[in-house]
């Protein structure tokens, strides 16, 4: 009931973010149901159905990542703490409230996905939509197992709720003697580079010689064997780990060669926010490099390389990762509100803050754009040679 009361008094932009979470959850739920339809309609192709289900893990992970980012920036699930403990709303209860709100948004999307899936299969009265074009793809002539439907549709709400509760769990406050100074490159940079190298090695090994059996994606783009996509997954994980270090490096570069006050401010802020925005930047870099590499594949030269479901999965991954980056930037902006107000009270012009923000964006693009292009070329090289 408290979650519903908070939702009624929430700002429209916050409700829009929750609606986007529901839409993303609905898209993943629809992909999972289509995979179930393929398994029901093609019982002899169980291996292909299992691989299609594994392919759905990528948009599912992107959606859960986005849902956690929305939960972290949701003011309805993290109101001011003063006096809330007296009524039983301590940090643990607030984390549970965030998990419940996230689960409700994702469950709404799953219900909408089920309704759309049943409508396309011809579950309602009247003729089939789109002249029955989707009937064969969704196995309209076969009954669906209810247990499998409920299990697949509960994946996103349960996973997102658990991830939100873990991300917002109360942490032990630091003692007065402990300092939070960050090291010169954050600790994840070497591990991230190692995972990127391992992913490229796995992709090269999997694609050498005859590519072998391609991964049966729900569309036309199925020229890559499963080992190549596993290498891409390792590369994406490595970029997510290396993102804070690369962002920290961008802040260092801003302060090189006799910096002025504006460059010092921009560099220090970027170094301080490296852990908050670095991982979303790394994930966006991974998705962008995969998109560039995919565009260079031989199958991409055809008129329609993507089927409808493959395109939906790609849109979900790209949209959720970019939206997660925007949520992280919004969270970082709220975190430095007090610093910006202090600078304004000290007489700093607002143009200085805007210039520092532009310098931060330029530094991030300067560091991450070459990394994205190089990784895209290296990822596509084994598949095009």
Image (cartoon, grey):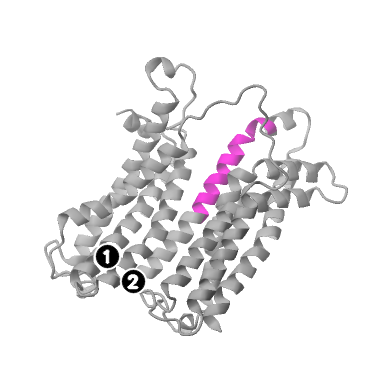
Q: Secondary structure at mark 1?
A: helix
- In this image, 244 relative to 208: left or right? right
Asked whether residue 326 is drawn in magenta, I would say yes
Residue 338 drawn at (x, y percent):
65, 30
User: Relative to the observer, which residue lies in front, 158 or 177?
Assistant: 177
Residue at 60% across / 40% down in the picture? Answer: 332
Q: Residues within 10 Å of mark 1 (few under 14, many from 20)?
A: many
Q: Is residue 134 magenta?
A: no
Q: Is residue 317 above or below residue 344?
A: below
Mark 2 highlights which residue? Answer: 218
Secondary structure type for disc 2:
loop
As displayed, is residue 325 above or below residue 196?
Answer: above
Q: Nearer the viewer, residue 165 or 277?
A: 165
Please report the bounds of the magenta region as a residue range: 322-339
Occupied quadrant, residue 382: bottom right
- Local crowd size for mark 2, using a 10 Å CA cut-off: few (<14), some (14–19), many (≥20): many
Label 2 to label 1: alpha-carbon separation: 9 Å
Residue in the picture at 61% in, 68% down: 375
Q: Residue at x 60, y 73 (%)?
A: 378
Labels 2 and 1 touching (C-beta < 8 A):
yes
């Amino acid at each position: 009931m408290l979650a519903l009361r908070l939702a009624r008094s929430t700002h429209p932009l916050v409700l829009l973010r929750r609606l986007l979470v529901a839409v993303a959850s609905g898209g993943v739920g629809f992909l999972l149901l289509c995979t179930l339809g393929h398994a029901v309609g093609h019982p002899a192709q169980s291996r292909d159905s299992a691989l299609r289900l594994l392919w759905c893990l990528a948009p599912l992970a992107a959606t859960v990542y986005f849902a956690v980012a929305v939960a972290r920036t949701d003011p309805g699930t993290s109101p001011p703490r003063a006096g809330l403990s007296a009524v039983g709303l301590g940090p643990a209860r607030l984390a549970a409230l965030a998990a419940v709100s996230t689960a409700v948004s994702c469950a709404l999307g799953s219900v909408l996905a089920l309704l759309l899936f049943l409508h396309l299969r011809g579950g309602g009265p009247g003729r089939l939509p789109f002249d029955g074009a989707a009937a064969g793809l969704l196995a309209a002539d076969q009954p669906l197992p209810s247990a499998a439907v409920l299990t697949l549709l509960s994946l996103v709400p349960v996973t997102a709720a658990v991830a939100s509760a873990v991300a917002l769990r109360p942490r032990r406050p630091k003692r007065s003697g402990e300092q939070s100074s960050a090291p010169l490159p954050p600790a994840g940079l070497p591990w991230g580079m190692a995972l990127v190298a391992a992913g490229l090695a796995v992709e090269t090994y999997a694609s050498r010689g005859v590519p072998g059996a391609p991964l049966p994606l729900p569309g036309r783009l199925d020229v890559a064997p499963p080992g190549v996509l596993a290498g891409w997954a390792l590369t994406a994980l490595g970029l997510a780990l290396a993102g804070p270090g690369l962002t920290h490096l961008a802040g260092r570069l801003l302060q090189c060669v006799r910096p002025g006050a504006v460059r010092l401010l921009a560099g220090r802020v970027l170094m301080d926010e490296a852990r908050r925005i670095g991982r979303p930047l790394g994930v966006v870099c991974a998705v962008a490099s995969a998109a560039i590499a995919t565009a260079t594949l031989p199958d991409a030269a055809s008129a329609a390389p993507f089927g409808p479901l493959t395109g939906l999965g790609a849109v979900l991954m790209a949209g959720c990762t970019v939206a997660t980056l925007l949520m992280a930037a919004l969270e970082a902006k709220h975190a430095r509100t007090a610093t910006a107000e202090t600078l304004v009270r000290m007489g700093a012009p607002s143009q200085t803050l805007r210039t520092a923000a532009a310098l931060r964006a330029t530094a991030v693009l300067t560091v991450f754009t070459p990394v994205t292009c190089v990784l895209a070329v290296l990822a596509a090289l084994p598949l095009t040679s």
